[in-house]
Amino acid sequence: MKSPKESIRIKKFREYINNHADTLILISKELDNKNYWNCICSAMDWIDLAIEHIEVSSIDNVDWHQYSLQIYMHISFVDIVWESIKQLHKMLINEKTIPFEDDNSIFQDTRLGLDDNRYFMHIRAAFGAHPVNLLEGRKKDGTETIRYASWPTSGIYNEYDYAVLLYSGRKGYNDVPFGFKIKQLTNFFESRYRYLEEIEKAIEKIVDDHFSQKKSIVIDKVNDPIEQLTILETENKTRLNNSYYDEVIHNMKSFFQTDFSDSKNHDVIKCFAELLDKGINEIYGKISAMEVSDLEVDVYLHPDYPHAQQFGYTFSKLSECALGYSNKPLIMLQEVIDPLSDVLSFNYHTIQELYWLVIIALNVKNGYCNVI
């Protein structure tokens, strides 16, 4: 089963899931009794682990002293993949069905009358899961009889590559050989693993349905920028759950909630406010259309600044404090004021006011706003 295509498939599946992570987390929060995200994360982690083992191990020509445990470990990792995919199917497609029910195209052992799913369960049980407690049948009175498996053997029975003898728990009953061919186990694994493609389709439908439903709902539009941003903040949480949009909205609200004390800065502050008004319309359109992409307004909110080491450090600390991400005391504020004092009056009463004066001054320096 050494095939790098298997790890490529789970990596692509993980990339696909990560691209829809915000939406899947959001949908999970909205549902009453299903958590898509937790189920998907658990399944991806265990499939990753199993594939890593399957690709580097082999049960061909295993050392005689090792092969009993090696075979069981190999079967167990196939089972982990299969159980993960079954759980994803139940969560995302149909909780009352199991993929490949009644299919017997792989093991084709008509003697036992088992479909492939049940045959694989018997392999798992007999080769290590519970080999000394295998159900043989039930009597009319309801009592159970069991069989006991020998250790695995190879090269003895033509119909199997690996086999066990099933010893009967009842007197007078013959031992029964039971096993599988390596090619059969490989085919079973690959067919079940390919079912991830169906899981992706199911996720795509869930996401598309969510997007269509949200697109049909018109977002309220108001004139007041703070009220509009509050509406967009709520809509983002229920539509896209996008952290980037959430940060942009948070920053814009901070500006519109800031009181500016020096009238000398009135015109340039007004110019900057007009830039952010356009940004409000931009993000309104993006959230309404259920689109996530870089926003043009981000250029004004995060303008380029002088690359002098001290300016960059002090400015980042000022940003953290002004936007509510830190409450550490600030020092050396002149390091950010002095390089910009030629374009703005830096009379300020609050850290928030200073921060936005710096942002506006940088926009002036970058040519986005007119100098007072």
Image: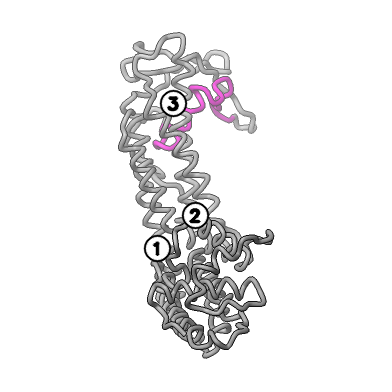
Q: Quadrant of residue 215?
A: bottom left
Q: On the rendered structure, is 297 left or right of 310? A: left
Task: Name the residue type under label 1.
Answer: Lys
| Disc with the residue nearer the chain's start (3 vs 1) | 3
Which residue corresponds to mark 1? 205
Q: Mark 3 against mark 2, which lies toward the viewer?
A: 2
Which element is circle 2 on?
helix
Q: Is residue 32 above or below residue 104?
A: below
Q: Is residue 368 above or below residue 164?
A: below
Provide residue 127's location: percent of width, then percent of height. Answer: 48, 22
Along the line of sight, the residue nearer the viewer: 243 or 327: 327
Along the line of sight, the residue nearer the viewer: 338 or 57: 338
On residue 74, the disc is 3
Q: On the rendered structure, is 325 left or right of 192? A: right
Magenta extent: 113-138
Which element is circle 1 on?
helix
| Disc with the residue nearer the chain's start (2 vs 1) | 1
On residue 255, the disc is none
Q: Is residue 145 magenta?
A: no
Provide residue 239's location: percent of width, then percent of height. Answer: 49, 71
Provide residue 283's location: percent of width, then percent of height. Answer: 44, 76
Which residue corresponds to mark 2? 309
For the residues labelled 2 and 1, say whether their Cβ atoms are less than 8 Å apart: no
| Disc with the residue nearer the chain's start (3 vs 2) | 3
Task: Name the residue type under label 2.
Answer: Gln
